[in-house]
Every structure is written in C-alpha cells, then in structure tokens.
Image: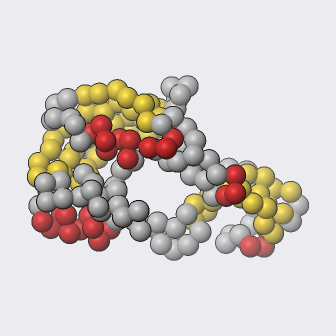
Amino acid sequence: MDNNSSMSATARHVSLHFTMRDEQGHLLDTSRGNAPMTCIEGAGQVLVGLESVVRSMQPGESRKFVVAPEQGYGLRDDTLVQKIPRAHLPVDGEIKVGDQFQTGPDRHAPVITIAAVEGDEVTVDANHPLAGMRLNFEVELVAARPATAEELKQAVEQAPE
C-alpha cells in the first residue's frame, strides 16, 4: 500500500499532544511534558486510527477515543514467532526474555523481541510489541496549518515503504 496516496497539497502540518494507554489504563506513551508531536497528515507518520481522528479536529480541540488493533499496530501474527539458533542473533553476551533487537541498520528495519531462551535455541517474536492491542488515546490538537511544499516533499522522502 502506498502510504502517500492519501497525501495531497491540502495536507496539514499538525502539532498535537497525546497520551496512549492500554486497556488496563497503563501509560504506554505520551508527549505531555515535552514539545507537541508534529506530523504531516497522510504521510504515514502516525497510526492510521490516530490520524483519522486528528484529521477531523480543529486547533484547541481535545478528544478521547479507542484505536482498534487493525488501525493501530496490527493484529498479532503467529507466523512471526519463530525458534532460531542463539548464534543467529546479532549480539554477543547474555540475552533474556524481553530483550529487543533491530534486525538491520535501517531505522525502519523490524524489531524482534526475545520471547524465550532454551539452551542454544531462542524464540523470537517479530510482532510489534503493541500488536493486537486496543489503544486508548487522549489527543489535543495544538495547531494546524497547510503543509509547505518542502514539508510535503520531505514527508514523501521519509515515508516507510
């Protein structure tokens, strides 16, 4: 799917504060206490479920909403959980359940999580850690303006493939 297909010359550059919690109310991430997060609408820079709500908001508006897994980090895929030889991991030294490693040098390379360690065999999980989760958001749209031609160009260049 082309992430840029929904980006147009009328795309907005938005600044927002957000708080993301799991279904039990545990804090997963927030911009509060820091500068607002900025992004270009339609550039694939934020979760689809978050962006779809923000697109309908005006500066100064706040909303609470739930993002389903399909509009967030996706559903869990059991085929992404595999046993591999310990020697195939890109690290030396001790590893433990919960350790995470990027699979390549590119910043978009998948991250794997160690799910189990059994002797010389390791179970790795390439699902996003938040896959399968319903995410509770609180969002405040701080500012919105038309994106500049340069911002649109940069967003296209930086979009994940």
Say which quarter of the image contains residue 155: bottom left
Q: Which x, y percent locates residue 29?
A: 44, 40
Is residue 114 visible to the viewer in this orientation of the structure?
A: no
| Quadrant of the image occupied by residue 34 | top left
Looking at the picture, the colour scheme in use is secondary structure
Residue ranking furthest to the right: 119
Question: Left of 121 or right of it: where is 46?
Answer: left
Place residue 86 in its image quadrant: bottom right
Which residue is found at the position 16% from the left and 35% from the top? Answer: 58
Residue shown at 22%/45% (left/top)? 15
Q: Nearer the viewer, residue 94 or 148?
A: 148
The residue under the point 61% across, 53% down is 127
Q: Residue 87: percent from the left, percent from the top?
A: 78, 73
Count of numbered tags: 0
Residue 80 in the image: state x and y as whole percent.
67, 58
Report the side of 105 relative to 85 (left or right): left
- The reply to whether residue 103 is in sight is yes
Foreground pick, 35 / 148: 148
In the picture, measured across the screen, residue 41 lies left or right of residue 59, that is: right
Above or below residue 86? Residue 64 is above
**Observer-nearest residue: 110 or 41?**
41
Residue at 41% x, 68% y is: 161
Quadrant where the N terminus is found in the figure = bottom left
In the image, residue 77 above or below residue 4: above
